[in-house]
Image (cartoon, grey):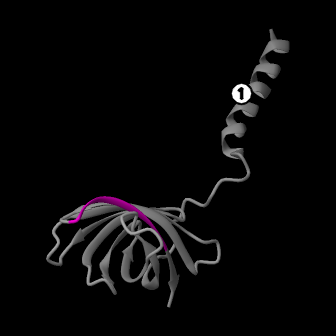
Amino acid sequence: MSRLVLPAICLAAALAVLPACGDGGSAPTTPANYTGTWVGDYTVSLQPGVTYVGTLVVSQTGSSITGTLTTNAGRTANVSGIISGRHMTATFTYTDGCVGSASATANLSADGQTVTGQYQSTDCIGSYTGTFVLRAQ
């Protein structure tokens, strides 16, 4: 009977260690820091070839962000979202005369200097999508 106990203990120990090993390439679970001012270009699917400039000012507490967006097209919005690692999901609620909202997903570059993402919007213009690239200021 003692011959069976030692292999069972070794197997149990090996199984207990394996989940802690992970895949070795996982992204960090600590949220990236999005706090600050981000400026860059964005596109609107309703106007192919046209690029606008947006300024996003973000405050972050833990994995939650809040902020404001202003653009050279006269758009303004309040922003709220969640950070997971370097990934962000956010909702933009327009505060200008064109009532509506947008949802966005984005990723922060490894060097923490660029946010790249896409959005879907519904407002007084209609429903449309777009992309954006913002850089830390």
Nearer to us in this view, 3 or 8: 8
For the image, the number of numbered tags is 1
* 72 magenta-colored: no
Q: Where is residue 56 in the image (x, y as percent from the top left)?
A: 38, 81
Q: Residue furthest bottom?
A: 137
Q: Position of residue 59 (x, y in %)?
A: 36, 80
| Residue positioned 78% across, 17% down in the render | 5
| Residue positioned 21% across, 72% down in the render | 94
Q: Where is residue 8 in the image (x, y as percent from the top left)?
A: 76, 20
Main SS, magenta region, reads strand
Q: Is residue 89 visible?
A: no
Q: Give the range drawn in magenta.
A: 125-132
Q: How crowded is mark 1: few (under 14 residues within 10 Å), some or many (20 or more)?
A: few
Nearer to us in this view, 88 or 22: 88
Question: Which quarter of the figure is the N terminus placed in?
Answer: top right
Task: Using the rendered view, name the quadrant where residue 28 is placed.
Answer: bottom right
Q: Residue furthest right?
A: 3
Q: Is residue 81 left or right of residue 136?
A: left
* 131 magenta-colored: yes
Nearer to us in this view, 90 or 49: 49
| Residue positioned 71% across, 39% down in the render | 17
Q: Where 89 sits versus 69, above or below?
A: above
Mark 1 residue type: Ala
Task: Using the rendered view, name the quadrant where residue 54 is placed.
Answer: bottom left
Q: Can residue 66 be seen in this view?
A: yes
Residue beneath disc 1 = 12
SS at mark 1 in the image: helix
Q: Position of residue 131 (x, y in %)?
A: 46, 67
Q: In this view, does 76 lie to the left or right of 132?
A: left
